[in-house]
Image (cartoon, rainbow, N blue to C red):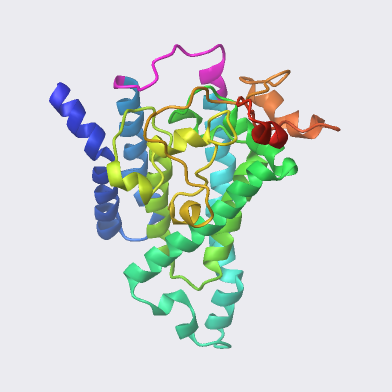
Amino acid sequence: MKALHWLLTRTFTYISLILAFVAIYLIGDDMGKLFLYFVLPFYVVSLTFQLIAPKVKAPLEKNELLTDIISNSVTIGLVNTIQTWGVGVVFALSSSSLLIHYGIIDAEFGLASLPYWAQVVLGLLIMDFFFYVTHRMAHEVPFFWNFHAIHHCAHRVTFMNAYRVHPVDAMFRRYVPLFFVMLTGISHEAFIAASIIGSVLSTVTHLNVDLRHGWFNYIFATNENHRWHHSTKMSEAKNFSIITIWDHMFGTFYLPRDRDMPTKIGLGDETGYPLHNYWQQLVEPFRKKKEEVKPAVTSTSAKEEALS
């Protein structure tokens, strides 16, 4: 059993990505079938793995699970439904697709003219660049942080709170990257493939399992480096992208070698914040007047205190 656990913690992400490639190859661009036959089973296996072998074993806090379940339901039911409907509309109306369709510009200027694998790679990079931008804005612009704070209020990083998000925050950080990647003229098939691969990688970032990735941590976001993003220290709360090239490029990559967990995860100043009440969290951003909820600073350094 220990040998199997050791093997799974070191291969889970790679096996999941391989199975994603196989599913894309066998099923194609049918998102409904991909969700039913790959994404949903992947979610079930991920949750089961987390329940069997959690890295952080602290007991659930009062109403923590209920808040996560409600948030997941709203996000999947509302945000994903709007996305599913909107993707088709944007593909039909986005400038590049429309201009190519009517022959105003030649198709060779769009990503669809490139080989399939190149479209997928470039689609992932472009999508993730704008995810990096919106995600960093969600931390550094007070207006957006008021909505994004919901995602950081939990005291642990788990599969269940990956979708603990305010709908406004979820739509901003998801729809903006999707819109810009669609403007490139990428083919529908490549777009679906990039979305499925991105879904696997983003799920792994929140798994409460002691996964070990080694060199992979420096290329893609994993739960090993993403848990630092949820640290209460602003000097540690970095790692905004899924493909870490953007964090390396803009100096926001953080992965210390002497520790594998932040001292504390969550919001540093939780005064009056509804940590485990989703309905109160929905209205919390609109109740802010003069002061904004900000990420915590637990360091005593003058520089970090100034940032608080």
Counting from the top left corner in percent of width and height, residue 238 is at 53, 41
Q: Is residue 95 left or right of residue 229?
A: right
Q: Residue at x 53, y 66 (%)?
A: 182
Q: Nearer the viewer, residue 11 or 258?
A: 258
Counting from the top left corner in percent of width and height, residue 168 is at 67, 43
Counting from the top left corner in percent of width and height, residue 267 is at 62, 26
Q: Quadrant of the N terminus?
A: top left
The quarter holding residue 10 reads top left
User: Relative to 148, does residue 296 appear above or below in the rendering?
Assistant: above
Counting from the top left corner in percent of width and height, residue 280 is at 71, 24
Secondary structure predominantly adopted by residues drawn in magenta = loop
The quarter holding residue 257 reads top left
Q: Is residue 33 magenta?
A: no
Q: Is residue 280 left or right of residue 4?
A: right
Q: Is residue 71 left or right of residue 42?
A: right
Q: Nearer the viewer, residue 86 or 43?
A: 43
Q: Is residue 72 left or right of residue 261?
A: right
Q: Which residues are magenta?
A: 52-67
Say whether residue 189 is visible: no
Q: Quadrant of the C terminus?
A: top right
Q: Is residue 62 magenta?
A: yes
Say whether residue 300 is visible: yes
Total labels: the figure holds 0
